[in-house]
Amino acid sequence: MKLQNVLILPILLCIAGCAQYHSPARNTWPQYLRGASFTDMTEVARIAKRPVFLGAGGKLISSIEMPANMEYGDKVQNDTAISVNYMANLEYELYDALRKPGISVQRAGTDVVVILVRDAIMELNVGDISSDGADTLKTISKILKKYDATFLEIAGYTDSMAASQADALSLDMAQRVGVYLSQHGVNTARMFIVGRGAARPIAAQDDIGRLTNRRIEIRLVPAR
């Protein structure tokens, strides 16, 4: 009997670990995304959201301990230096952890942007996150929880072929990613979730370019 238990346990662990992820029922999404804002992450929106963010346990860049090699001086200069150092470390960790096809990590000033091509994280022709996508988002979740002095905007994009449904499809992708991150411990008070349809293409609208334009972008900004 003991031998059977020893043999069965690894099988049960494999089944649990290899189970296909499925997004929860759509009518439960508001519960998972409570605290998230469904608007562009502008500076004004971040300032307005800050009390909610802090009330939900969020922290600002100014609360980050100053690196030992940084000189004391003007507070604004120090906060800027801390932000640059903090976001650089975040970028390096994301870049090292996400070396996969269809995924890129970029810097835009102090902001960090993770670009996830749709087919790299979602099922083909099905509106749900794939097994590989779940692994990728789980990795992102762990890093986002570590670097929690940030706001994040989750923006979905489509190509120009589905013009009549572009806004709904892009918002659906963004919300699914938001729900997954919420399920894995990312504070929703940090989140801005938007669907931008076919706006802001990053590639040509040909057969290959459309695959790239269908994407989710996670933009991370220091919380000030």
Image (cartoon, rainbow, N blue to C red):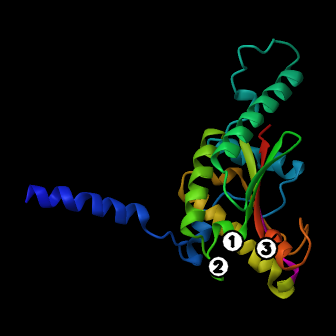
Q: Position of residue 173 (x, y in %)?
A: 70, 71
| Residue indicated by mark 1 | 119
Residue found at the far bottom of this picture: 164
Q: Which residue is mark 3?
A: 211
Residue drawn 55% across the image and 58% down it: 135
Is residue 152 rendered magenta in the image? Answer: no
Disc 3, SS: helix
Amino acid carrying label 2: it is Leu
**What is the C-alpha distance between the residues marked 3 and 1?**
8 Å
- Cα separation, mark 2 vs mark 3, equals 11 Å
Q: Quadrant of residue 18?
A: bottom left
Q: Which residues are magenta?
A: 155-160
Q: Is residue 8 left or right of residue 90?
A: left
Please name whichever residue, 98 or 38, is drawn nearer the observer in this view of the structure.
98
Mark 2 closeness class: few <14, some 14–19, many ≥20 residues within 10 Å: few
Q: Which residue shows up at 84% across the image and 52% down it?
A: 45
The residue that appears at 83% across and 70% down in the rendered structure is 213
Residue 3 % position (x, y): 12, 57
Q: Is residue 46 left or right of residue 25?
A: right
Is residue 79 positioned above or below 180 on the image? above
Label 1 CA crowd tier, 10 Å (few <14, some 14–19, many 20+): some
Residue 149 makes an appearance in the image: no
User: Which three-letter amino acid code belongs to the residue tagged 1?
Assistant: Asp
Q: Which residue is mark 2?
A: 124
Q: Quadrant of the N terminus?
A: bottom left
Alpha carbon separation for disc pair 1 and 2: 6 Å
Image spot of residue 110 (x, y percent): 85, 39
Circles 1 and 2, Cβ within 8 Å, touching? The answer is yes
Indicate the amino acid at tag 3.
Leu
Instruction: For mark 2, give the secondary structure.
Output: loop
